[in-house]
């Protein structure tokens, strides 16, 4: 464990595809989605403790959620919670994190990862992270973990591998956007493509050089905070300047443009837990493929459903197949599993008809 190792966990999203479980005031990363008694954020924090001490783990979140972060991770200081005043996608957030860490430790190597992923094989995950951190400390390299695809999934971006640079580390040939079904099948059949998990590893100097070169509009705005990072002036600067940064993903701003990008193929029981169907896939199921969470469900001639109830509630279902049923007391959602990608749009309809009350 190097004392130059840090972790940043991105926890600012709303998780609108998990509505009505995930709300603006308490998004999915703060919820116990898996029935373990711990939120996804807490599970992610604990997953990284073998890599570095709690004092080296930073949470990047929206200012709205600072108190939720403190409640769920009391081990960290206020300076370890980066509060974004606006949602500007991942490129500004990565640059903000890198500048803040570089001011603390100019030799910092850090992992930046989402707060809402599942990792079932934690030891295998840590081995790949350590391999990446070691490479990032020695080389001017931007690394991403690539997941060995289990199926031709159209819901993920893909990474095409080029030559193996050293054992287990490959140069990236290109990033591919979410493909159609035929393209996804061709990707998987070729053996050259991995799923893009959005887990990145780099040295602070390497990533900041990349921002200077490929995203100077972000770099130049945030660099004006030099001398104030980790001090009393930081939050005021961020509140004022951060909303003026471009709204763009780090994949687009940096990774798709840089020529020193590498990937590490990995298989560690990963899911990005992006939708109710992905939660259904990860949960224990009954003999008819129903995932029954919370409360009590009597399922009669019912199959392949996800049912999530409040504690103490009973639901009786009959002749229901391939459905999502989520009861949050004030909102009941009953939706075909095959159309779950529409749920994000449903929230817009709810807002139009009822205002912000149920969001």
Image (cartoon, rainbow, N blue to C red):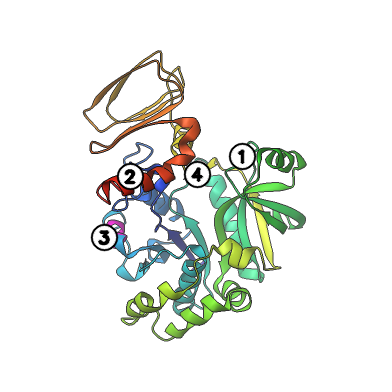
Tell us which disc is closer to us: 4 or 1.
1
Q: Nearer the viewer, residue 79 or 22?
A: 22
- The quadrant in which residue 133 appears is bottom right
Q: Which of marks 4 and 1 is nearer the N terminus?
A: 4
Q: Label 2's element?
A: helix
Q: Residues within 10 Å of mark 4 (few under 14, many from 20)?
A: some
- The quadrant in which residue 321 appears is top left
Q: Which residue is drawn at 42% across and 41% down?
A: 343
Q: Which residue lies furthest to the front in this view?
A: 353
Residue 67: mark: 3
Check contact, mark 3 vs mark 1: CB within 8 A.
no
Check contact, mark 3 vs mark 4: CB within 8 A.
no
Residue 119: mark: 4
Q: Which residue is under mark 1?
A: 153
Taking 147 as reference, is 73 above or below it? below
Residue 110, image x, y percentages: 52, 65
Q: Which of marks 2 and 3 is nearer the N terminus?
A: 3
* Label 4 – label 1 distance at C-alpha: 18 Å
Q: How crowded is mark 1: few (under 14 residues within 10 Å), some or many (20 or more)?
A: some
Stretch of the chain drawn in magenta: 65-69
Q: Which residue is under mark 2?
A: 350
* Label 4 – label 2 distance at C-alpha: 33 Å
Apparent side of residue 346 relative to residue 173 in the rendered image (left or right): left
Q: Which of marks 3 and 4 is nearer the N terminus?
A: 3
| Main secondary structure of the magenta stretch | helix
* Label 2 – label 3 distance at C-alpha: 27 Å
Q: Label 1's element?
A: loop
Q: Residue at x 43, y 45 (%)?
A: 345
């Amino acid at each position: 464990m190097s004392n130059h190792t840090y972790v940043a966990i991105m926890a600012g999203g709303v998780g609108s595809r998990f509505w009505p479980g995930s709300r603006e005031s308490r998004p999915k990363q703060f919820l116990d989605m898996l029935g373990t008694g711990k939120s996804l954020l807490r599970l992610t924090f604990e997953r990284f403790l073998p890599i570095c001490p709690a004092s080296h783990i930073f949470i990047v979140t929206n200012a709205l959620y600072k108190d939720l972060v403190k409640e769920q991770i009391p081990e960290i200081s206020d300076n370890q919670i980066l509060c974004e005043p606006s949602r500007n996608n991942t490129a500004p957030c990565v640059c903000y994190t890198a500048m803040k860490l570089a001011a603390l430790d100019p030799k910092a190597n850090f992992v930046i990862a989402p707060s809402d992923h599942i990792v079932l094989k934690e030891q295998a995950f840590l081995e790949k992270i350590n391999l990446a951190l070691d490479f990032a400390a020695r080389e001017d390299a931007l690394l991403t973990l690539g997941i060995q695809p289990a199926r031709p999934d159209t819901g993920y971006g893909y990474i095409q591998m080029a030559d193996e640079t050293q054992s287990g580390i490959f140069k990236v040939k290109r990033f591919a956007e979410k493909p159609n079904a035929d393209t996804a099948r061709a990707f998987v059949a070729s053996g050259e493509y991995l799923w893009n998990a959005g887990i990145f590893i780099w040295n602070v100097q390497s990533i900041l050089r990349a921002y200077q070169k490929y995203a100077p509009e972000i770099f130049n705005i945030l660099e004006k905070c030099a001398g104030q990072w980790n001090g009393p002036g930081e939050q005021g600067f961020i509140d004022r300047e951060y909303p003026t940064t471009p709204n763009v993903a780090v994949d687009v701003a940096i990774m798709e443009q840089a020529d020193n990008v590498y990937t590490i193929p990995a298989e560690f029981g990963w899911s990005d837990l992006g939708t109710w169907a992905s939660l259904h896939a990860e949960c224990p199921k009954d003999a008819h493929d129903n995932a029954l969470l919370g409360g009590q469900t009597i399922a009669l001639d019912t199959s392949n459903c996800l049912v999530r109830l409040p504690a103490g509630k009973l639901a009786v279902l009959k002749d229901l197949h391939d459905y999502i049923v989520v009861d949050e007391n004030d909102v009941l959602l009953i939706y075909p599993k095959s159309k779950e990608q529409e749920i994000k749009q449903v929230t817009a309809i709810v807002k139009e008809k009822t205002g912000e009350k149920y969001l």
